[in-house]
Amino acid sequence: MTAQHSSTTGNTNVSLFARAQRTTPGGVNSPVRAFRSVGGTPRFITRAQGPYFWDAEEQRYIDYIGSWGPAIVGHAHPQVIQAVQEAAARGLSFGAPTEGEILMAEEICKLVPSIEQVRLVSSGTEATMSALRLARGATKRDKIVKFEGCYHGHADSLLVKAGSGLLTFGNPTSSGVPEDFVKHTLVLDYNNTQQLEEAFKTAGDEIACVIVEPVAGNMNLVRATPEFLHTMRRLCTQYGSILIFDEVMSGFRVALGGAQSLYGIEPDLTALGKVIGGGLPVAAFGGRTDIMQHLAPLGGVYQAGTLSGNPVAVAAGLTTLKIIQEPDFYSHLSAQTRKLADGLCAAAKAANVTFSADALGGMFGLYFAPAVPTSYAEVMQGDKERFNVFFHAMLDAGVYLAPSAFEAGFVSAQHDDAVIAATINAAHAAFATIA
Ligand SMILES: *Cc1c(COP(=O)(O)O)cnc(C)c1O
């Protein structure tokens, strides 16, 4: 029995994927890992260090997903590992409060000034779901506004795409979500300021909240225009609606203070995740004290979690938050990401491939399109087939990009000049196979 299940020798990615599919739907525990969009066999990862990870066949890859964002200080950072080991030795979970949770809350409130109070949860999905319930409870309104192409986790009322016309309510994008559950979700176009104004003019008094990725990272990378976000802030204030920035991805990723610090906008509530756990399950939602006081045990909005603020996870998160505050952390990270984006554009140009790229903090977008997109519709116009060819050529050369044309990429502080240069080198050859 044990020999049969040993994964130390003789495994290949193909053999592991075949085995995984017997006991796990699609062989994966989160859909995009399955490579369905790009085709081929997912890589089964055995270990990671700094900017690299290795698969079951001992192939090394330069990693540009960083666990989809959390690995901002690089994989297996010695300080993070040490903090986790020390916390684990003291016990894994208590179901009673710890000082680590206070330190984590104090750190988040310090780094993101719009957050006066915060509650820790275990996933981004929980954070946004809880923020929505809180917004509805605090305003005593039902309707919510979201934007096409923004992902806020997989809560029922957020798995919605736009209806057929302006101000129609959304259609579920997942089977298993009753239409009744999304009938209060209004889906608008990202970066369409005029449509947003019209929506508020029509239904503003009924809107509990607007939830938005201020830098969208789940339809590739798409920046909000300042006008779009400032209008949103003004309308929410005017109509008494709560503005929720979903910074699960952009928080501590595009800048130390998140996207809200770049745009100079204070949302009423913020959802955080990914980086704040440093690779372990920590997420959070927080904001104005007068809103947060509606949460149980003080108020009537219920929210809870057996592993919320888990001491081992908080140790990883706190240590990560400490490292990212070291001098020049973000200027270095941004410079490396910018070098990558510029280098990839130059390589594409040399091969005569229509391509553009964007970089913000430690996040980047690659587009097989003539210009950086500003909306979901524009993102969808990108050349998916060319991306897939490029993806596999890069993978064969030892560079692991997100396995979908519609996902953003992530750079860590450990992606040094040699790593970026090796990536651009690989890209020259990969673009040549497309042209
Ligand atoms: C990843 C993500 C989520 C969901 O977080 P999970 O931890 O995967 O549940 C929510 N919102 C945004 C913007 C995300 O990028």
Image: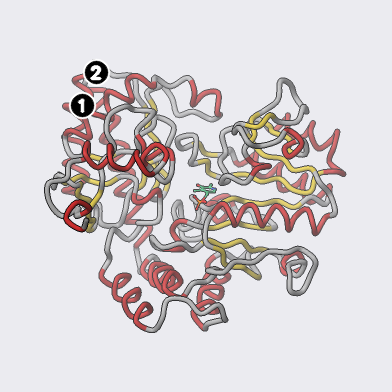
Q: In the picture, residue 366 is in which quadrant?
A: top left
| Residue displayed at 20% across by 46% down | 55
So how many labels did they put on this image? 2
Local SS, label 2:
helix
Residue 194's x, y, as percent?
73, 30
| Residue 52 visible in the displayed image | no
Residue 373's mark? none
Residue 430's mark? 1
Q: Which three-letter amino acid code belongs to the residue tagged 1?
A: Ala
Q: Is mark 2 within 8 Å of ligand 1?
A: no
Neighbourhood count class around disc 1 (C-alpha, 10 Å): few under 14, some 14–19, many 20 upward: many
| Residue displayed at 18% across by 47% down | 56
Q: Are marks 2 and 1 in contact (CB under 8 Å)?
A: yes
Name the residue carrying label 2. 434
Q: In the picture, residue 184 is in which quadrant?
A: top right
333 or 128: nearer the eye?
A: 128
Quadrant in which the N terminus is drawn: bottom left
| Residue displayed at 35% across by 73% down | 84
Local SS, label 1:
helix
Residue 402's x, y, as percent?
35, 38
User: In the visual, does 30 lie left or right of 4?
Assistant: right
| Residue 40 visible in the displayed image | yes
| Residue displayed at 64% across by 41% down | 158
Placement of 435 over or under 210, stated as above or below: above
Q: Which three-letter amino acid code belongs to the residue tagged 2?
A: Ile
Placement of 240 over or under 107, stated as above or below: above
Quadrant in which the C terminus is drawn: top left
Q: CA distance from mark 2 to mark 1?
A: 7 Å
